[in-house]
Amino acid sequence: MPKVLDTYQQWEADGVLDERIKSIQDMVARRIIQKDIAKAMNLSENTLIKLKRSHPRLNQAFINGDDELKYKLMDALFQRAVGMEYEEVQTIIEETSSGTKKRLVKTKKKALPDFNSLKYLLIIKFGREYNERKEEIDIMLKRIEKGEETWINEHSDEETLGVVNIRKQPKK
């Protein structure tokens, strides 16, 4: 009895695997959700999930697509942070005695740098040095180093920390 191939193996046998993986990566990079990717590949979402789990190359396509999207978004944020030049095209249609004329008017514009984008990128790239709360963070770190302050999880077991339960006095 011949072995039944899963969809990934069938793509490989048909010689379309590389094309499908590239297509999936491109869709992920364009923010298309997994459900729609499965639909575009003529699969159910559950089948796509199973294929991702059993075939690392397919899973890597999703990871690479996410990385590509992240790169594009960070690049757009950087462009906004430092300011950019862009060209605005306006189409003007004029009616003359000889007929209709289309005229394109191109205008070069410069977007000013965005302070919030700059601040965000500086904090992400260079850390606490550019954080507006730098002094507060430094003070908290000094307190922790000196042992003056202890941070606990609010859902932790109080008895293991040696916290004494205080009972409310009954009203008289």
Image (tube, rainbow, N blue to C red):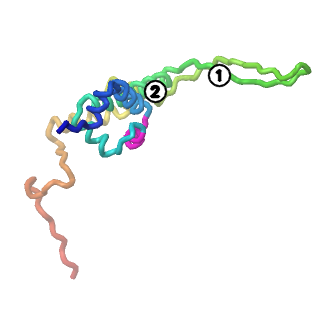
Label 2, residues with CA under 10 Å away: few <14, some 14-19, many ≥20: some
Of residue 163 and residue 34, the one placed in the foreground of this image is 34
Q: Compare residues 88 and 144 and report the one nearer the observer.
A: 88
Check residue 77 in the rendering and tell me which mark sits there, or answer none: 2
Marked residue nearer the N-terminal end (2 or 1):
2
Span highlighted in magenta in the image: 31-39
Residue at image position (69%, 18%) is 106
Quadrant position of residue 170: bottom left
Res 49 visible: yes
**Position above or below: 39 against 99:** below
Residue shown at the point (46%, 26%) measured from the top left: 77
Image spot of residue 134 (x, y percent): 33, 31
Would you say residue 128 is visible in this rendering?
Answer: no
The picture quadrant where one finds residue 97 is top right
Three-letter residue code for mark 1: Glu
Compared with residue 85, is residue 145 higher up or lower down, i.e. above or below?
A: below
Q: Position of residue 103 (x, y in %)?
A: 76, 19
Per the image, the residue denoted by label 1 is 88
Q: Residue furthest front?
A: 1
Helix, strand or loop at label 1? It is strand
Main SS type for the magenta part?
A: helix
The quadrant of the image that shows the C terminus is bottom left
Spatial CA span between label 2 and label 1: 20 Å
Q: Is residue 35 magenta?
A: yes
Which mark is in front, 2 or 1? 1
Image x and y of residue 39, in percent:
41, 41
Which residue is at the front of the view, 168 or 54?
54
Disc 1 packing (10 Å; few <14; some 14–19; many ≥20): few
